[in-house]
Amino acid sequence: MTYPNVESVSSSSNRLIIDELDYDIPVIKNDFDRMFLALTNEQRNIFLNIMSAVKENKGGVFFVYGYGGTGKTFLWKTISAAIRSDGEGRLGGLNDGETIIDIPDDILINDPDDLIGSLIKFVYPSILEKYSSTDYFQERAILAPKNEVVQEINDRLLKKFPGDEVEYLSSDSI
């Protein structure tokens, strides 16, 4: 994939790009100071872990999850303001178009003909021996972007279990 050159982006008339590249460092610093003080202890710990990786140039993948309204967006805005307020970092900006990602072989899906089957084998090894253990399922999950994929995964998993499939219906009111 080709990347746009810096000159074409900086002279762009795209409002989103212009907004992304145009910010006032003193204003961002004040925003950061205010937001940092408002972080909960849990958010502050997450913030410090992520910022440590940023400042030490370690990189990393951080998955922050929670129900709606738990402060994930606020945490993201605080991290963004912290990086931008130092005057050097720009989140969401261009890179030189090159990166090396080393994905360990043991987490790669190597069967291009049966991606879902490979994923199920990876996430649920020995499923037939351990399907009656609640801990087994509490420690594993497959996240899918679309309901159709969830349905396909569920159908494939259900076919593996012994016995007949039973569907239970429920209602919130009578």
Image (cartoon, rainbow, N blue to C red):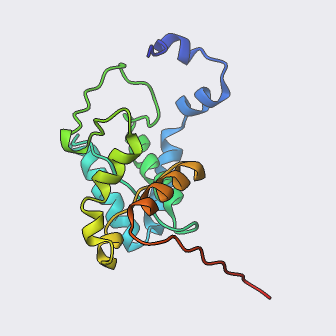
51 on left or right of 11? left
Tell me the quadrant of the picture where the C terminus can be found. Answer: bottom right
Asked if residue 49 is positioned above or below residue 20 in the image, the reply reads below
Name the one closer to the observer, 14 or 166.
166
168 on left or right of 105? right
Name the one closer to the observer, 71 or 131.
131
Asked if residue 103 is positioned above or below residue 29 in the image, the reply reads above
Instruction: Give the residue at the far bottom of this rendering.
Output: 174
Q: Residue at x 25, y 59 (%)?
A: 125
* Horizontal and vertical percent position of residue 140: 34, 64
Residue 12 occupies quadrant = top right
Asked if residue 160 is positioned above or below residue 59 in the image, the reply reads below
Q: Residue at x 37, y 41 (%)?
A: 86
Tell me the quadrant of the picture where the N terminus can be found. Answer: top left
Number of dots carrying numbers: 0
* Horizontal and vertical percent position of residue 112: 36, 32
Name the one closer to the observer, 6 or 60.
60
Residue 57 occupies quadrant = top left
47 on left or right of 11? left
Instruction: Give the residue at the far right of this rendering.
Output: 174
Q: Residue at x 38, y 69 (%)?
A: 162
Q: Residue at x 72, y 83 (%)?
A: 172
* Horizontal and vertical percent position of residue 126: 24, 62
Name the one closer to the observer, 131 or 123.
131
* Horizontal and vertical percent position of residue 156: 45, 55
